Image (spheres, rainbow, N blue to C red):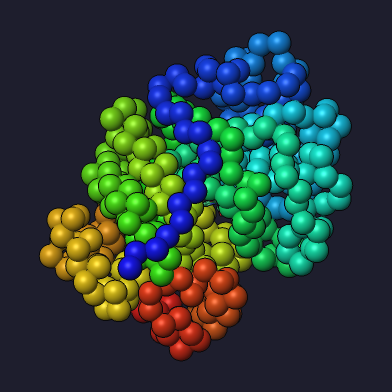
Amino acid sequence: MVQFSYCMPSRIVLGKGSTADIGKYAVGKNVLIICDPFLYQCGVAEKIGGHLTGCQVAYFHDIAPNPSCESVDAATAMARAMGAETVVGIGGGSSMDVSKIVSCLTREEGSIYDYYSGGTRKLSKRTTRLICIPTTAGTGSEVTNVGVFTNQKTHIKLPFVSDEFWPDVALLDPELTYTLPPAVTASTGMDAFCHAIEAYWNKESQPICDAIAVEAMKLILANVKAAYDDGKNETSRENMQLASLMAGVAFSQTRTTGIHALSFPLTAEFGASHGTACSISLPAFIRLVGESAGEKMERLCRALGYDSTSVLADAVEALMVSMEMPTRLSQIGVKESDLDHITEVGLSAAIIQLTPAVMNRETVRALLASYL
Ligand code: NAD
């Protein structure tokens, strides 16, 4: 018997120029916009802030990729000092994730470390409005209850899951993604593919998310290379943003699996971007899961137009190579002697056990060795 629960409390608004309507969704007079240095310097954040007529808008524009708990605390201090009533995250997953926790901590005391990574305090109900505006087509963070932060003391990067993190509004405008450089288009686009396929094969998968995930995968396979080749190709940019959103909706219900679990040490310790750290494992995981999740993976292959999981894995790998993405761990500086450690850190992330294959020291190390 099919049994599942599906919850999507975020309002989703997608369309060209949709950010001009941000004023409809913000509350109060004091708005904090959180973004990275690029989105501030190129004027995107201020342009969106300019639509908040009658509001006092402040900008925290210091977010680095794989954001640290320290940057969360710095942005929180700003939100508290100005009495932010709405927090807006504009950017890739890094800025959106920080906006989620900052909107929760605005009316709490203490540091993110008190609530996460060994902290014992619990977030209370969020009363600050949260709006997320993605500028990459990859993480789907605008529609998830997850934030991923790096503990700078331990260099450990781990997801923080809280129902207080669902944004009130996900505001998507594909035009914001036109400036993404080819390498970021490729890595974030393949991150979205990982979300979709990990939702689909997940032990917690469910029919609504399966359907959404398959459509997301079709859109990515048909559009990511075109967006990589020509960033101004409007159709491919629109389709990639839609695919990333759909993949986000799918994995928001199921969580991710081994691909994401193994990505955490690769970003925190080897400096790979999040999308690269995930997709580098994608072909190997498709081959592995193809063996254990037989019939369901066969249905996926038929839906995507491939004869078998090994053909799908080869096609995904060729697509990555065509976008100059690494497909071997050695290409991002991993050595044979690092595999035991990566295995240990990967196994410490609970999501690894949502993979429909045996995930233990031996199997994970053998998998990593297969694409060293
Ligand atoms: P990012 O936010 O780290 O940004 C990567 C780079 O892209 C930055 O240099 C940024 O300036 C640049 N950039 C962003 N938008 C741009 C644009 N429109 N034009 C030009 N440059 C632009 O990248 P990301 O991959 O979107 O986010 C990765 C983070 O999200 C990681 O920390 C990851 O763990 C997290 N994540 C979160 C979730 C979630 O559900 N919360 C899901 C997946 C990943």
Picture residue at 24% right of the left edge, 74% below the top: 294
Residue 325 visible somewhere in the drawing: no
Q: Observer-nearest residue: 136 or 167?
A: 167
At 13% across and 65% down in the image, what residue appears?
A: 307
Is 293 on the left-hand or right-hand side of 56? left
Q: Position of residue 239 (x, y in %)?
A: 31, 36
Is residue 335 toward the left or the right of residue 151 in the image? Answer: left
Residue 34 seen in render? yes
| Vertical position of residue 55 compared to residue 172: above or below | above
Instruction: Give the residue at the far bottom of this rendering.
Output: 362
Query: Can you say whether 27 is above or below 212 in the image?
Result: above
| Image location (x, y in percent) of residue 315 | 22, 60
Please name the residue shown 40% across and 22% down the image: 16
Residue 115 figure quarter: bottom right
Can you give x and y, in whole percent of width and height, for residue 284 in the image?
A: 34, 71
Query: How many numbered circles are shown?
Result: 0
254 vs 104: above or below? below
In the image, residue 3 lies at what x, y percent? 39, 63
* Apparent side of residue 343 relative to residue 104 in the rendered image (left or right): left
Q: Quadrant of residue 316?
A: bottom left
Q: Residue furthest front?
A: 1
Q: Quadrant of the C terminus?
A: bottom left
In the depicted view, which residue is nearer to us: 245 or 221? 245
Residue at image point 46% right, 56% down: 5
Image quadrant in which the N terminus is located:
bottom left
- 368 w.r.t. 118: above or below: below
